[in-house]
Image (cartoon, rainbow, N blue to C red):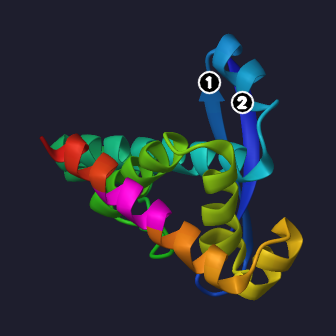
Amino acid sequence: MKELTTQIITKNGNIRIIKVELEDELADWLVTQTHAIYHDFLLSEYKAKCVERKETRRTQSLDKSLENGFDVKDESLESEEETLLRLTLEQAISRLNSQQQWIVRQLYYVGRKQVDLSKELGISKSAMTQQISVIRSALKKILKNFQE
């Protein structure tokens, strides 16, 4: 088992380091990925552990809870449902071709503008708009297949 860390910013603006233990092979693979994938994966694993701890706490006696201390819920963490939706969307995005994935990430994760991307790709703004429409349709189709 290897322990990997990443930083999160809490609602009150504090930086917090979270630690996650992973199997060696998975940890070795994860460190070769982009920062976004590395961070998102560790964050989702951390949140899953928090949910496990929460479920465990429900079954503990009050004395046992006092012995172990109380976990304060971090409001900056997304709900289990939000995590599931985000991971489902990530899976759907991964089924797009590499250029489409890049466009999605630049527009919706990095926050770049369509006009900037169209210039970088050497295409017109209307061609970029059309590509985005194709991407949205493809994602809708992929997500519909996930629901079935």
- Which residue is more in the foreground, 125 or 116? 125
Report if residue 137 lies within the magenta region.
yes
Locate the C terminus and report the quarter of the image it occupies.
top left
Check disc 2 and report the residue beneath it: 30
Callout 1 crowding tier (Cα within 10 Å): few <14, some 14–19, many ≥20: some
Q: Give percent across and percent down for residue 49.
A: 44, 41
- For the residue marked with disc 1, what is the amino acid? Leu
Residue at 42 percent across and 66 percent down: it is 136
Asked whether residue 10 appears in the rendered view, the answer is no
Looking at the rendering, the stretch of residues picked out in magenta corresponds to 134-140
Q: Percent from the top left, x then y, of residue 93? A: 50, 50
Q: Is residue 143 positioned above or below 28 on the image?
A: below
- 116 left or right of 64? right
Mark 2 residue type? Leu
Q: Nearer the viewer, residue 60 or 74?
A: 74
Q: Position of residue 23 (x, y in %)?
A: 62, 16
Instruction: Tell me the residue at 82%/30% (across/down).
Output: 32
- Exactly how many numbered labels are in the figure? 2
Residue 117, image quadrant: bottom right
Residue 22 marker: 1
Of callouts 1 and 2, which one flags the residue occurring earlier in the amino acid sequence? Answer: 1
Quarter of the image where the N terminus is located: top right
Q: Is residue 47 left or right of residue 110?
A: left
- Whether the residues at callouts 1 and 2 have beta carbons within 8 Å, the answer is yes
Residue in the image at 31% along x and 59% along y: 140
What number is the disc on residue 124? none
- Which of the 4 image quarters holds residue 115? bottom right
